[in-house]
Image (spheres, rainbow, N blue to C red):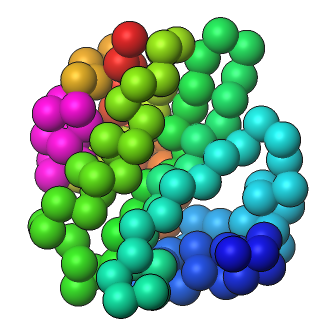
Amino acid sequence: MESSEQALAIWSVLSDVYDKSPWSLSQISEDLKKDSTDYFFVYNDGEVIGFLALQQLVGEVEITNIAVKKNYQGKGYAYQLMSMIADIEVPVFLEVRYSNIVAQKLYERCGFVVLRKRKNYYHDPIEDAIVMRKG
C-alpha cells in the first residue's frame, strides 16, 4: 500500500473511532514519511480496520496511536496489533486516557505496567493520561 493510501486508511479508522480525530490527514501523511515511524495494520476482507503507530526513539519506542474501527472492537484486533510488536527488545511506552479502562486492561495483558499519571494531558475533553511501560 502506498503512503497516500495508508494515510487515507488511517484517516478512515480515526474518523470512525473519534468524533473529532486527534490527527489531521496532513499530520498522518507527514508522520508516514518519517524514518523513525512505523505503522502496523489489521485487515478484514481487504479493508484496513485498525492500525498501530510507533515512534522509534534512542533506546526506546513510543506507541503514538492504536485504533480499531468501532464495529470491530472487542474482537481481538487490538491484541493482534499489540502482538505484532511483542518482540521489541527496548522499553516501549504509551499514554492512555484515564477513563479508557478497556485499553488499560489490554495493555496490562500485553505486559505493560503503570508508571505515572500526566495531569490534563488530553484535550477535547480534558483528561489525565496514564503512562505505561513494557520492558
Viewer-proximal residue, 19 or 84? 84
The question of residue 109 being in magenta is answered with yes
Residue at 73% from the left image edge and 66% from the top image edge: 28
Residue in the picture at 48% in, 14% down: 89
Q: Specify whether 14 is left or right of 131.
A: right
Left or right position of 135 against 109: right
**Magenta-colored span:** 101-110
Indicate the quadrant where residue 112 lies. Answer: top left
Give the vertical position of 116 relative to 77 (above or below): above
Position in image of residue 116 (x %, y %) = 35, 18
Image spot of residue 84 (x, y percent): 40, 43
Q: Quadrant of residue 55?
A: top right
Residue 94 in the image: state x and y as whole percent: 45, 33
> Can the viewer see residue 133?
yes
Residue 118 appearing in the image: no
Count how many numbered circles sit on residues in the image: 0
Residue visible at 73% across and 14% down? 58
Is 69 colored magenta in this rendering?
A: no
Question: If the image is split into quadrants, where does the C terminus sit?
Answer: top left
Left or right of residue 103, residue 63 in this image: right
Foreground pick, 124 / 30: 30
Give the residue at x 45% y 86%. Answer: 47
